[in-house]
Image (tube, rainbow, N blue to C red):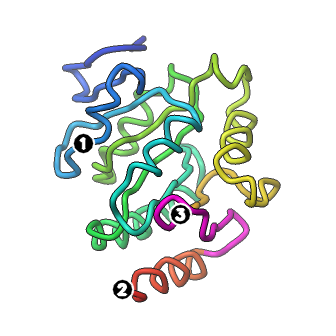
Amino acid sequence: MLTFYHGYSQKYDFVMTYASDSFDKVLHFNQDDSCIKFYIGTDQTVDSLINLSKKKYQAVITYAFWCKTSRDDLPGILSLLRENKDLVDVYLICSDSYDKIRYNYFYLKNHLYHYNPTFLLDIDYYKSDRNSKRMTKFIKAICPDCKTKKMGFASIIIFNQGNYLTHTNYNMDYKTKMDILKGLMMEN
């Protein structure tokens, strides 16, 4: 079993580090790099990146490798966002515990999700053993206007140059989520 909290894994080709230790690297990630980069971060980390983004849109996507909605919806959603990478920065957020990083790695690698950065929510910062509570705290902090009772895994929050624009939730079907994103991308 792999126990891995900080550093580089040659066996699995991923990097895991604290976002504060490598903030400049987070800002200059290479989307075409096949190495999956995990950053332990908080809502403050992601909020800073959103506000520093030069692109028109910023998409914060919550996921869980074990969630059926995530597995079903994310391939198409991320493909659409990748096609529009000149318009949108994508931040993947996972609230699983650090010992699940190997599963997250395989999930992202098997689906060719080379979007970077991918954030694991800081367990010490959110002071919760349950990943759903960490995710709810994250969403409430980053998006006070979002209806967190219907949000969780496979939700998308869209910002327009740092200002909240819209969001989806797990009750929406795949077509509705895609229609919202396509509508935004077609405005350009």
Of the numbered discs in the image, which one, if any, rests on residue 71?
none
Residue at which label 1 appears: 29
Of residues 12 and 53, the one nearer the viewer is 53
Q: Is residue 172 magenta?
A: yes
Q: Residue at x 27, y 29 (%)?
A: 14
Task: Name the N-terminal-most of marks 1 and 3.
Answer: 1
Q: Nearer the viewer, residue 162 or 57?
A: 162
Magenta stretch? Answer: 158-173
Query: Which residue is nearer to you in this view: 173 or 143?
Result: 143
Within 10 Å of disc 1 (Cα), the crowding (few <14, some 14-19, many 20+) is few
User: Mark 3 or 2 closer to N-term?
Assistant: 3
Q: Quadrant of the C terminus?
A: bottom left
Q: How far across and how far down the image is residue 150, in percent?
A: 78, 59
In the picture of the structure, the residue carrying the numbered disc 3 is 159
Residue 175, horizontal then vertical, whole percent = 56, 81
Q: Which residue bears the numbered disc 2?
A: 188
Relative to 117, 92 lies left or right: right
Residue sitting nearer the eye, 186 or 176: 186
Looking at the rendered image, the quarter that the N terminus falls into is top left
Alpha-carbon neighbours of circle 2 within 10 Å: few (<14), some, or many (≥20)?
few
Quarter of the image for residue 70 reads bottom right
Amino acid type of the residue that numbered disc 2 sits on in the rendered structure: Asn
Answer yes or no: do the residues labelled 2 and 1 have beta carbons within 8 Å?
A: no
Q: What is the spatial separation of the Cα atoms under label 2 and label 1, in whole angstroms?
A: 24 Å
Q: Is residue 93 above or below residue 186?
A: above
Please provide percent x and percent y for residue 140: 73, 46
SS class, disc 1: loop
User: Could you tell me how far apart the alpha carbons at marks 3 and 2 are, in whole angstroms?
Assistant: 15 Å
SS at mark 3 in the image: strand
Q: Is residue 136 magenta?
A: no
